[in-house]
Image (cartoon, helix red, strand yellow):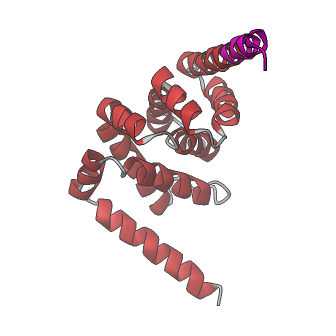
Amino acid sequence: MSSSLKKNLHIRRCHIVYYVIMHTHKIIEGLNRSICKSDRIAAVKTALREFSHEDEARHDEEIQLGAANALYQKLALAMFQHHTSEEIGLICESLHCVYFCSLEMKETSFREIGKDLVHLLTQVIAQCLEHKIRDETHVPGIMENSLGVLVQVSFVHSAEVEMANRDAFLDQMLQIIHLDQSKSNSNK
């Protein structure tokens, strides 16, 4: 391969990376600007389409650009306003996607929002267990994705300690295990 061809390929790769970063930045800005419920749902759907991939390096970029922070804010807003299970489900699924980042980015994110995110996700799980989030079509996905985020974050030692020391966390996990066992037994 000639040096000019290598140079052109390198330039082309740089342009693609720049485009992806700018596109992701635009999506995160959209999340940050969305306030009313319909705008939030539309922004989170767009983010979910963007974040649904298996590229750890892209997830690292998403964390660096503030995706987890923006989604955390949307989840907090949705939980303390009149929300729909669809909205909570989309946000939790989007969070689950971005946390397939590297351990280094999980640690960075946990330092910024981790304790508050763990607290908020345990509230989401509690509302599902207490049937306050009632839509049966979304509750299993909400539970699965909330737990998925907690599993991904638990790779960070300080997050693991935070979860272990959180009152009611173990109780919630046992309720979920018993819920799964009762569903398994009823299907037999």
Say which quarter of the image contains residue 92: top right
Instruction: Tell me which residue sits at (53%, 26%) in the image.
Output: 61
Q: Nearer the viewer, residue 56 or 80?
A: 56
Seen in the picture, residue 89 relative to 187 is either above or below; the reply is above
Give the tally of numbered discs.
0
Residue 146 in the image: x percent, y percent? 49, 51
Instruction: Tell me which residue sits at (59%, 60%) in the image.
Output: 140
Left or right: where 126 falls relative to 45: left
Residue 157 in the image: x percent, y percent? 27, 49
Whether residue 20 is visible: yes
Residue 49 in the image: x percent, y percent? 70, 35
Seen in the picture, residue 65 relative to 131 is either above or below; the reply is above
Whether residue 123 is visible: no
Q: Nearer the viewer, residue 94 or 21?
A: 21
Main SS category, magenta section: helix
Q: Which residues are magenta?
A: 1-14
Check the image and name the residue furthest to the left.
165
